[in-house]
Image (cartoon, rainbow, N blue to C red):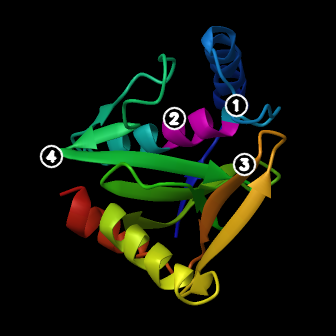
Amino acid sequence: MIRIPLTPEMIEEAQREQKKFDAQKTWNKFPSPNAYIGLLGEMALDIHLTSLGLDHEWVTFNKQGWQHPDFRHNGLTIDMKTTFDTKMWNQKPKWDIYVMGHLPEHKQYLEIRGWLTKDRMEELMEQAEGSEGSAEGCVKVIRNFGNGPRTDWTFNDEAMFDTNKLFSSIFI
């Protein structure tokens, strides 16, 4: 696990940018006062990668739609998933790599808990479908936010690859 320090200024900046992003959106999955934590996770990962001298591109956050990944590195697309939960949440995998960031309530640091490839995520989801919705740390969750049921998937620490492999296998 990697802990990346956060500052009050980073949190305020993420909140300001999220307001700008929300103002241009034409559709919202579900409104949340905590939506800014996604950007906060991206900011923290960008700072961490930069501090390590790792070549990467952080794709502009305040963009129309969801056609672009959060990061690019050596031809790979990378999505940062930040949550107050200790599990990574996702729907249909689209990018090559998913990095899980946990934001503790105190917001003093971001924990990078693990990561998954798109292929491994799909493999776990398929196994869970065939096992009453749960397999190897992957759980199928059906939720309703008022727009009808939606299928999400959670991936706990058991399902994810170790963060050391993220830096020895991906960010090289």
How far apart are the alpha carbons under marks 1 and 2? 10 Å
Earlier in the chain: of badge 4 and badge 3, it is: 4
Q: Given the image, on which type of amino acid does mark 1 rest?
A: Ile
Label 1 crowd bin: few (<14), some (14–19), many (20+), radius 10 Å: some
Which element is circle 1 on?
Answer: helix
Q: Nearer the viewer, mark 2 or mark 4?
A: 4
Q: Nearer the viewer, mark 3 or mark 1?
A: 1
**Residue 43's disc number:** 2
Which residue does the image show at 52% across and 70% down from the upper left? 1
Residue pointed to by mark 4: 74
- Write down the quadrant of residue 46 in the picture: top left
Residue pointed to by mark 3: 108
Magenta-drawn segment: 37-44
Earlier in the chain: of badge 1 and badge 2, it is: 1
Q: Main secondary structure of the magenta part?
A: helix
Label 4 crowd bin: few (<14), some (14–19), many (20+), radius 10 Å: few
How far apart are the alpha carbons under marks 4 and 1? 29 Å
Which element is circle 3 on?
Answer: loop
- Write down the quadrant of residue 50 in the picture: top left
Q: Nearer the viewer, mark 4 or mark 3?
A: 4
* Whether residue 69 is situated above or below residue 3 in the rendered picture: above
Residue pointed to by mark 1: 11
Q: Given the image, on which type of amino acid does mark 4 rest?
A: Asn
How far apart are the alpha carbons under marks 3 and 1? 10 Å
- Write down the quadrant of residue 165 in the picture: bottom left
Which residue does the image show at 50% across and 38% down from the upper left? 42
Earlier in the chain: of badge 3 and badge 1, it is: 1
